[in-house]
Amino acid sequence: MTVKLPDLILEPIIRAALMEDLGQFGDVTTRAVVPDGLEYSARIVSREAGRVSGMQVARLAFGLVDPALAIDVRIPDGENCAVGDVLMTVTGSAASILAGERVALNFAGRMAGIATMTAAFVEQTRGTTARITCTRKTTPGLRIVEKQAVLHGGGSSHRFSLSDAILIKDNHIAAAGGIAQVLTAVKENASHMVRVEIEVDRLDQLEEVLACGGADVVLLDNMDTATLAEAVRMVGDKIVTEASGNMSLDRIGEVAATGVGYISVGALTHSSKVLDLGLDF
């Protein structure tokens, strides 16, 4: 999946990262040792196999530093790469390339790591109808790029923010006085344009949700696989089902086999390993 976002959305995040890295006086090392006007060609190279993500962001990082740089994306976001593959070439001012290098690599390595981990989870669902989805457990300020990376890995996105949808969790239920009370309140107060999901962790809670109505999705949280399978059977095609909680790679296959519609994995964005990328002149 390419999943290219409008540059306008991404630019403020990338600009802030460049400002953080360049500080108040720019790249003093390059200014001291690299001759003015020197031009070079550099390559972003993959040092391990994985799923590419962050090329759009890297291109924007170099372009914000110096619009005159010639940038050629060789392997686009959403495609696989092998060790030694050239993902991007950047040609022009050596000083400009060096100024944008770390920000470009930080974003691309982080995003490719998320995409690679997502692709591994998605692979475990092959042959089922389950879809892997990420959560709001993202790095503050970087949610849009981390969720974009999940899409490049073949996953799907959960809520982008608290304002996207209603997700009633255990603390909401406790505060409202119970499942019946919270679902009644939603029916009375929620916009007809907003979907409603409610979290349960026991089958008796699920029975109450189905009896009350008012939910579009039920989040089956921290259930063992046998209980999860029974929950999916109880729901049938009444509402959408989603599983969450302790979703490790070695368990995803059996969870997907229960027939659950979605499997949310917080680890995609909070525990992914950075893919090793380098920039070589």
Image (cartoon, rainbow, N blue to C red):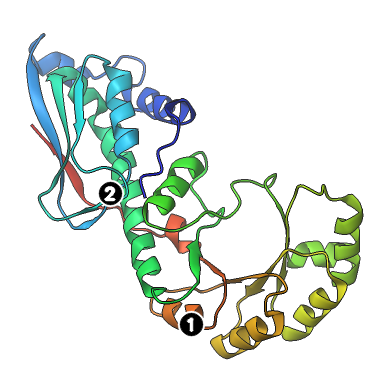
Pointer 2: what residue? 52
Q: In the rendered structure, which amino acid carries the disc numbered 2? A: Val
**Residue placed furthest toward the front:** 237
Mark 2 packing: few (<14 Cα in 10 Å), some, or many (20+)?
A: many
Q: Is residue 156 left or right of residue 191?
A: left
Mark 1 or 2 closer to N-term?
2
For label 2, the SS is loop
The correct choice, above or below, for 20 with respect to 152 in the image is: above
Q: Residue at x 43, y 51 (%)?
A: 151
Q: Is residue 213 left or right of residue 143?
A: right
**Gap between marks 1 and 2 measured at Cα:** 28 Å
Residue 46 in picture, x, y percent from top left: 17, 48
Q: In the rendered structure, which amino acid carries the disc numbered 1? A: Ala
| Residue 71, quarter of the rendered image | top left
Locate the C terminus by quadrant: top left
Q: How many marks?
A: 2
For label 1, the SS is loop
Residue 257: mark? 1
